[in-house]
Amino acid sequence: QVQLVESGGGLGQAGGSLRLSCVASGSIISITAMNWYRQAPGKERELVAGITSAGSAHYADSVKGRFTISRDNAKNTVYLQMNSLRPDDTAVYYCYADIVTGAFRLQYQYWGQGTQVTVSS
């Protein structure tokens, strides 16, 4: 069984920083894409940033230059460094990963439980 567990959310101040972590555990053969999504109240879930196993990253326009995604493949962990926080970054942040697992080496999509990030002005 595979699971993703996020940590590092909480309360931040406008202009400040927070760092999120997400660890994948279980019967993992390999992990391809690892992404961060967020969902603010009354809004749809949106892609914030993503990173491939080779380290190629992409970002939503709203966070470019402020957020940095990285991963440690040896630890099955993805990070999201959030700088220059703004009140509109307030949301529940979700980790997502494409993970190859099982005897048939099939790829499945996994989500974390979400971690709340609240940015005060």
Image (tube, rainbow, N blue to C red):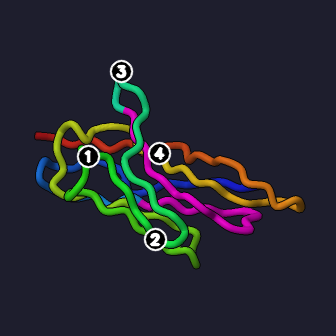
Give the foreground label among 2 and 4.
2
Residue at image mark 2: 55
Write down the quadrant of residue 58 in the picture: bottom left
Q: Residues under labels 2 and 4: Cα distance?
A: 19 Å
Q: Residues under labels 3 and 2: Cα distance?
A: 32 Å
Q: Which residue is drawn at 55% across and 55% down?
A: 5
Give the foreground label among 1 and 3.
1
Earlier in the chain: of badge 3 and badge 2, it is 3
Q: Residues under labels 1 and 4: Cα distance?
A: 18 Å
Left or right: where 87 falls relative to 46: left
Give amino acid for label 2. Gly
Give amino acid for label 1. Asp
Q: How crowded is mark 2: few (under 14 residues within 10 Å), some or many (20 or more)?
A: some
Dot 1 lies on which element?
A: loop
Percent x, y of residue 107: 73, 54
Earlier in the chain: of badge 1 and badge 2, it is 2
Q: Which residue is drawn at 41% across and 43% down?
A: 47
**Residues rendered magenta in the picture:** 21-39
As drawn, the label of residue 94 is: 4
Residue at image mark 3: 42
Q: Residues under labels 1 and 3: Cα distance?
A: 20 Å
Left or right: where 34 falls relative to 47: right
- What secondary structure characterizes most of the magenta part? strand
